[in-house]
Structure formats: C-alpha cells, structure tokens
Image (cartoon, helix red, strand yellow):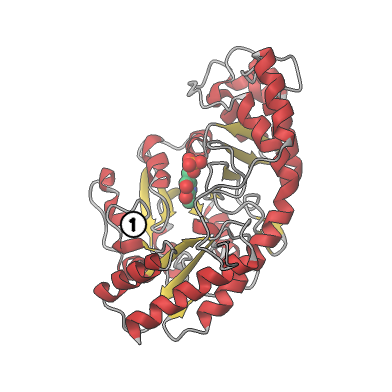
Amino acid sequence: MAPDGQILAPNVYDAEPIPPAAREAIDQLLASGDLFRYTAAKDAPVALLEAEFAELMGARYALAVSSCSAALFLSLKALDLPRGAKVLIPAFTFAAVPSAVVHANCVPVLVEVGANYRVDMADFAAKLPGAAAVLISHMRGHTSDMDAIMALCDAAGVPVVEDAAHSLGTEWHGRKIGTIGKIGCFSFQSYKLVNAGEGGILVTDDPELAARAVIMSGAYEHNWKKHPGLQNSYMRWQNALPLYNMRMQNLSAAVIRPQLPEVAGRVAKGRAGHDRVAARLNQSPWLCVPEALPPEERAPDSIQFNLKGRWSDAEALLFQAEAKQRGVAVQVFGLSQDNARAFWNWQFLGDIPDLPKTRAMLMRACDVRLPTRLTEAELDFIASALVDAAVDVMG
Ligand SMILES: Cc1ncc(COP(=O)(O)O)c(C=O)c1O
C-alpha cells in the first residue's frame, strides 16, 4: 500500500510465510544436530510428517523425499517398469515430468492437451494401447477427466501415477487428488501451497509399492524398520533394489509440519481468490478462464486464462508487456523463450512429436501467480491490470 492509500502492485513471487511454530522445532534440531531422518529411534520429524500427511490424505503410506521429481521417479521405479517402457504423460506439464520418465529408463509418450488445460481423451485413448504406465500431471492443479482415465487404465490393466505437485487440497467427486491412482506425488517446492524450499512426498495404499519406494529412497540396511507397514515386503526388497538416496532431511519436515494444519484455510482462500479474479477476466471480451470439469473442487494458487478471439503473437507479447507495465507479471507459456512447460523445448527427448492442440493452447494460454496470501484489494489490482492491458492491445 502506498502512503496515499493506493494499492501497489502485489509481489506474487514471495512464497507462503513459514508459521512461527516451525522455529522451535528448527532450534531444537540445530541444537541437537539431529538432521538425518534415520538417527532417532522414533518420532523423527520426517517420520512424523509422513504419518500426518498420510492421515491428511487418507492414504495408508506416505514417503517424504527430496522433491516431487524424486517422488515421480521413485514411483516409476517402484512399478518395476521394464527398460524402454512407454509412459503416457500430458504434453502440458513441467519439464521435470518427462525428465523423471527418462531418468527411470522409460519413454514418455506425450498426449495432447486441450484449450481447457486437460488431457484430450480421444488422443489418450488412442495412445494407451502399448503403454506400461500413465503419469497424469494435474498441471497447475487442473484435473483431467479422472473417471475416464481410470476406466480406460483399469480396463487395460495400466497403473496410474498422479503428479499432484500443484494439487494439494484439490478434490474429484470429493476424493483427494493424489489418492485416485496407484501413487500420488506432491511438491513442497516454494511455489506450491506448502513451502519448504524443496521437498516432495508420495502416497499410496499399496504395501509393495510403498516398500519398494522406501528402500530405493535410501532406507539402507534396516532403516526400513522405522517405516510402518508390512515387514515382509521390506525384507523381500532389502538389498534387492538399488538405493537412489532421495531422502528428506529433518529440517525440511520441521518447516512443512506446521503448515499442514493451514492447508484447508489456504485452499479455501486460494479458491476464493482465483474465482474472484476469474469472474473479472471472464467479463472481458478478450480473456477467458476455462471452466473446471464438474467433479473437480479446485485448490489454485495461480490462475491460467486464454487470450480469446483473434490475437496475433505480436499482440499477445504486447499484452504481456502492458500487464508488466502495470506491475503484473503474466507469461504466455508458448511465447516466453525456453519455457520449461512448452514441450518443444524438451530437446532431451530427441524427436518431439507434433501436437497441434497443445501447441495452439500454449501459444495463447497465460499464467499468473496468485499466492493465497493476497488480499481482495491486491487480487482486484491484478484483475484490473490484466483486463486493462487486454483493452490497450485489442481495443
Ligand atoms: C507439474 C509439476 N510436476 C512436478 C514438478 C516437480 O516438482 P519439484 O520441484 O518438487 O521436483 C513441478 C515443479 O514445479 C511441476 O510443475
């Protein structure tokens, strides 16, 4: 707020603040030096986080790791996919997702994504035969048609991993996203609903998958005894699987745990803030926020919208510049150089298929962060800046 009471452009890049309750736990850890998750006989912060997160999600097992990317990689390894196995992923996701597939010695098959940011089900059904697994990124928290995806995958006997990096708190028919497929993976990187700088967690109800992921995450020797679950499963995989050492350390868990009780409040605020801005943008003849699918209850901490009508690339770039001039950073995914969410930049894949639907969407889809801590005045500031920038360019 400026001294004259005027609202200044909000800073949307600062992450969610860490609750003061984290400080005491961190001080204790610093005093004891006990930062490794497996030193304490029991109740290490990482173990407590896993128990609390599993309960929050209603899942049997949770495994905290160094990042969501690590969780995705371990999920694919836990599924024991053969080298070269095809894994379907949406073509609209972050580069870390195809990277996790490549890292697991599998081959990502990119599926078209429509103008509503969700998996194109006709392309999905066409590409499913021959796939060994499906990794659904609920990119930016947009849930694809999980009823159709699960029906097709169950019928084909193909396991589904959910990349719920942006979906903590999102529900589908009242069911928590991340608990619909065999494994769900979440991120605690700073630009997510829960901020630990870095970190990730996976949840599953399957004891074999949990045991395999625990061992490979780096539960060497008998450290797996500090994980609840079926001892037989752990004994079976002990020494039989490689260790990738992707463990979470206690300091990260100490930062995350006090934020878990805040998730419900952040979800409600994030949804209200998103919908407030979306209502304003949808009044513009030039902007459009696609509707969620009916079973989805969203938990957004950012907003995506499309430039509606006949925009040229030059006009879209001008819109970005006009919004920036007003203090609001907006990114048209496909028009920012080297964007990690534009599939044509994933050169590590080698041959990149032509995906005209996804490409068309990315060339006109805009991305603006809306951290849940923003006030209504700040949200209105952002909405006005975007609407006015569109008018400036398109009249
Ligand atoms: C859709 C999606 N999946 C996975 C990841 C990877 O998360 P992390 O940074 O925790 O590895 C990201 C990162 O932002 C993401 O956007």
Q: Position of residue 194 (x, y in %)?
A: 62, 45
**Residue 266 location in percent, x, y?**
68, 55
Seen in the image, is 236 located left or right of residue 47?
left
214 displayed left or right of 133: right
**Residue 208 can be seen, yes or no:** no
Label 1 crowd bin: few (<14), some (14–19), many (20+), radius 10 Å: many
Residue 33 can be seen, yes or no: yes
Q: In the rendered view, does 201 fall on the left or right side of 85?
A: right
Dot 1 beta carbon under 8 Å from ligand 1: no
Residue placed at 56% from the left, 47% from the top?
Answer: 15
Query: Is residue 30 left or right of 382 when viewed as pictured?
Result: right
Label 1 sits on a secondary structure element that is: loop
Residue at (35%, 71%) from the top-left corner? 322
Mark 1 lies on residue: 342
Quarter of the picture holding the C terminus: bottom left
> Which corner quadrant of the image does residue 218 belong to?
top right
Which residue is drawn at the image coordinates 54% and 15% (left, top)? Answer: 239
Viewer-proximal residue, 324 or 118? 324
307 to 44, vertically: above or below: below
Q: Amino acid at mark 1?
A: Ala
- In the image shown, does 322 or 64 lie closer to the viewer? 322
Q: Identify which residue, 130 or 355, lies in the foreground.
A: 355
Q: Residue at x 72, y 20 (%)?
A: 28
- Residue 240, image x, y percentages: 52, 19
Looking at the figure, which quarter contains the N terminus?
Answer: bottom right
* As drawn, 103 above or below 340: above
Q: Residue 248 occupies which quadrant of the picture? A: top right
